[in-house]
Amino acid sequence: MPANLLEIRNLSRSFKLGGMVLGKRIVAVDNASLRLPGDKPQIMSIVGESGSGKTTLARMILRLLTPTSGDIVLGGVPLSVYGKRRNRKAFLKKVQPIFQNPFTSFSAQRTVDSYLFETALNLDVAANRKEAQEVVTEVLRSVGLELAAVKGKYPNQFSGGELQRISIARALIPKPSLIVADEPVAMIDASLRMNIVNLFRRLKDEYNVSFVYITHDLSTAYYVSDYIATMYRGQLIEFGEARSILNDPSHPYTELLLDSIPRVGNKWDENVVLSDTDAAEAGSAGCRFSGRCPYVREACRAAEPYMVDIAPKHQALCIMHNDYQTIDTGRS
Ligand SMILES: Nc1ncnc2c1ncn2[C@@H]1O[C@H](COP(=O)(O)OP(=O)(O)O)[C@@H](O)[C@H]1O
Ligand SMILES: [Mg+2]
C-alpha cells in the first residue's frame, strides 16, 4: 500500500485578536482530519463560504503558518520536519503554491520569465541557463504558452488568465507531488475559469501531481474533484470521494450547496458563490450549522457532532448519521 498522499490529523489553528487580557480567540481551523489516498494523483477541492478556514488550512499545508495543534503528513513524512525557513528548498520541491491574484505573485518591475528561470535554477532543476531554458520551455508548453511569446514581458502585458497559467507553469518546474491552489480562478474572467480547472485535470496525469484546489466557486469544484472537503466555520464537516458526495451528500450544508449549483447537463456558466458566514450564529452550543439546518432537532443544539463514516471513503459531521449507524448495525 502506498502511503497516503496527504494526511491531516486533528489540525487546529487559532488566532488571538485584540489585547492579551480582553482579547478574543478565533479558531480558524478546528480539529480537522482527513486522508487523501496516494494510489494515484488526485484533485481535492476544499469548498466553503468565505471565513470558513480554507486559506488558513492551505497556509498550514504550505508551511506558511504553523498549526496550533495537530499534524500534516505528506507521503508519509510529517511536514513538521520542514521549518518555515529550514529545509524550505526541499519542501518547495515537493509542494508548490498558486495564489489567488497572479498580479501580486509577480513583481511589476520584473519580467515574468525571470521568475521561471530563477525557480529552475534555485530549486536545482537546472544546472545552468541553457538547461533552465529547456525546462521553462517545457512547462510553458504544458500550459499552452510559448517561451518566445512570454520572454522579456512584464506582468501588465498579460491577461489575468495568462498570468495564472504562467504561475501554474512555474509551480510545475520542480515536478512537485502537490500543488496547493488557493482560489486560483477567483480573479479570472468567469468564461476562462473552466479552462484553468481543466488544465489541472490534464496536468494531474501528465505530471503525476495532485492538487488541493480551494474555491468558493462550486461549479468548478464539483466538476473537477476526485475528493471534496467541505468546511463550515472552521470545521471540516464532510470529506470523501467526489462521486460519493455528489450522489449522497451527507451533511445538510453540503446538500444545500449542491442544490445551489447548476445540475449536470445544464451549462456550467453560472457562477455560484457562497454567502458569508452568518455572524449571528456564532457562540451557539452544539452543531454549528444547527441555526441554518432544515433538519435540526433538539439533540443538535445539545452536543457537538463527531465525524461518522457514511461509506468507506466518505465521512460527515452530522448527528443524523449516528442514528443511521445505530439502525444499520442494531447497536444502541
Ligand atoms: N492572520 C489572522 N489573524 C486573525 N484572524 C485570522 C487570520 N487569518 C484568518 N483569520 C480568521 O480566521 C477565519 C478563517 O479565515 P480564512 O482561513 O481566511 O477563511 P477562508 O479562506 O475560508 O475565507 C476568519 O474568521 C478570519 O478572519
Ligand atoms: Mg481564503
Image (spheres, helix red, strand yellow):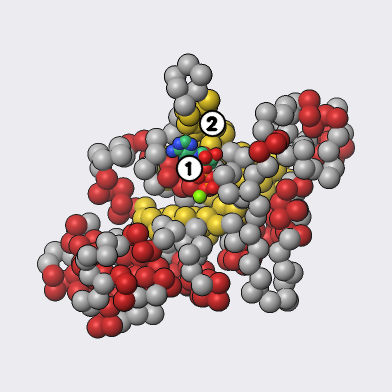
Amino acid type, mark 1 = Thr
Queried on whether the Cβ of the residue with tag 1 lies below 8 angstroms from ligand 1, the answer reads yes
Task: Kindly indicate the quadrant of the structure image that contains residue 99.
Answer: bottom left
Task: Kindly indicate the quadrant of the structure image that contains residue 289.
Answer: top right
Amino acid type, mark 2 = Ile
Badge 1 local density, few (<14 within 10 Å), some, or many (20+)?
Answer: many
Count of numbered circles in the view? 2
Q: Locate residue 228, reporting x and y percent.
A: 61, 54
Q: Mark 2 points at which residue?
A: 26
The first of marks 2 and 1 along the sequence is: 2
At horizontal 44% and vertical 19% (from top left) the residue drawn is 20
Queried on whether the Cβ of the residue with tag 2 lies below 8 angstroms from ligand 1, the answer reads yes
Residue 94 visible (yes or no): yes
Q: Say whether residue 37 is left or right of residue 153.
A: right
* Depicted 71 relative to depicted 40: above or below: above
Q: In which quarter of the image is the C terminus?
A: top right
* Depicted 31 relative to depicted 46: above or below: above
Q: Locate residue 212, reporting x and y percent.
A: 49, 55
* Depicted 147 relative to depicted 280: above or below: below
Q: Say whether residue 49 is left or right of residue 95.
A: right
For label 1, the SS is: helix
Residue 73 visible (yes or no): no
Q: How far apart are marks 2 and 1 (CA)?
A: 12 Å
At horizontal 70% and vertical 36% (from top left) the residue drawn is 280
At horizontal 57% and vertical 44% (from top left) the residue drawn is 51
Q: Name the residue under label 1.
A: 56
Judge by depth and name the residue closer to the eye, 73 or 30: 30
